[in-house]
Image: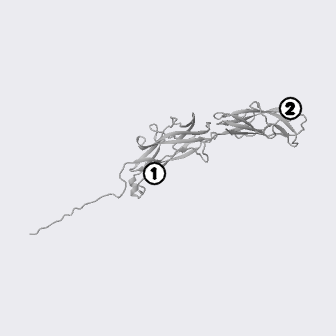
Amino acid sequence: MTIKIRTLLPLVLIMGLANGPAGAACDLGFQRLRPVNWRPGHSHTYDPFDPEQRVQNETLTVRHRGEACRYFVTFSQGRANSYERAMFRRGESLEYNLYRNATLDTPLKDRPEAQSNEVLQGRFGSERDGWRRGRGRKRGRRIQRLDYFMSIAPLQIVSPGVYRDTVRVRLYEGTPSHPVRRDERTLTVTTLVQAAVQVSIGETGAAFDPRRTQEKLDFGELEKGEKAYADLMVRANTGYYIIISSRNRGRLRHDRRRRNTVGYRFEFDGTRINLRRRRVWLRFAAGGTALGSSRHPMAVTIGDVANAPAGPYSDTMTFTVRAR
């Protein structure tokens, strides 16, 4: 009799995964949301008389863990309660906006008004894919940087100082039609408006032209009581000083015979100015609104010319305008 003994060795299959992240859902958040400070080019201020529409590039960073997902970022209206955004200071406003691209044709918006082209959008692949490809050394965290753009409307004549706005920036998983909010931050927008003045000089009634800074009064043959007129025009976003000086202290001097002079009377804004002083300081409030200017009429009246030798006479007056 033969007895067969069969030994059964069960086959145990042990299956597992290489070390890697758990199959978590899409985990999104802002990694960095820096304040926006207006600093176009080499300047760190807003010049109210600069006619150029300047654009500034800004960046925000989104971090990701977990499964593949789409996402988008929205921007609230800010303190203006409008998508024509504005920064504020003591009751004054400075218009600006945040845009999706540098062409400034698409302002960024918030839900529910925002369309798909009025938000920032992106997509992350699965974190698991990153581990399989050997990119999991930093615990699988990945980031994407999104660009957006800021611009301030030019030629806004507002008072100098710091203007601010706050905008809520929200990060959503999904698409604008199927959103899940994942993060939210406050973005501070700040601009320093510089104290600025511009000056122009010309004949009575002339238009303001900042390139025109010289004017010649030609009396021809001098006669007592003869008059000539001109306008000094100032535009400013702050109070200002006008400093007046005369090379010959209020007298026309013979170009060759320097000891011979002819006096004249100078009036500024209808008031006689004593040019014997080295400098005359006049104080004024802010000049003009929008692109207008404050106009200061000037008049020169020739004095006694008796016994004055023939020849050319001249004087040079200098007007310096300074912000207060």
Q: Decide: few, some or many residues near mark 2? Use Cα within 10 Å; few <14, some 14-19, many ≥20.
A: some
Looking at this view, is 81 or 108 the one in front? 81
Residue 105, given in percent of the width and then of the height, sits at 53, 41
The residue that label 2 is drawn on is 224
Q: Position of residue 215 (x, y in %)?
A: 76, 38
The numbered mark at residue 270 is: none
SS label for mark 2 = loop
Q: Residue at x 60, y 39 (%)?
A: 161
The image quarter containing residue 225 is: top right
Q: CA distance from mark 1 to mark 2?
A: 82 Å
Instruction: Give coordinates of residue 294: x percent, y percent.
Output: 69, 33
Q: Amino acid at mark 1?
A: Ile
* Corner quadrant of residue 137: bottom left
Residue 313's x, y, as percent? 85, 39
Residue sticking out furthest to the bottom? 1
Task: State the residue position of label 1.
Answer: 143
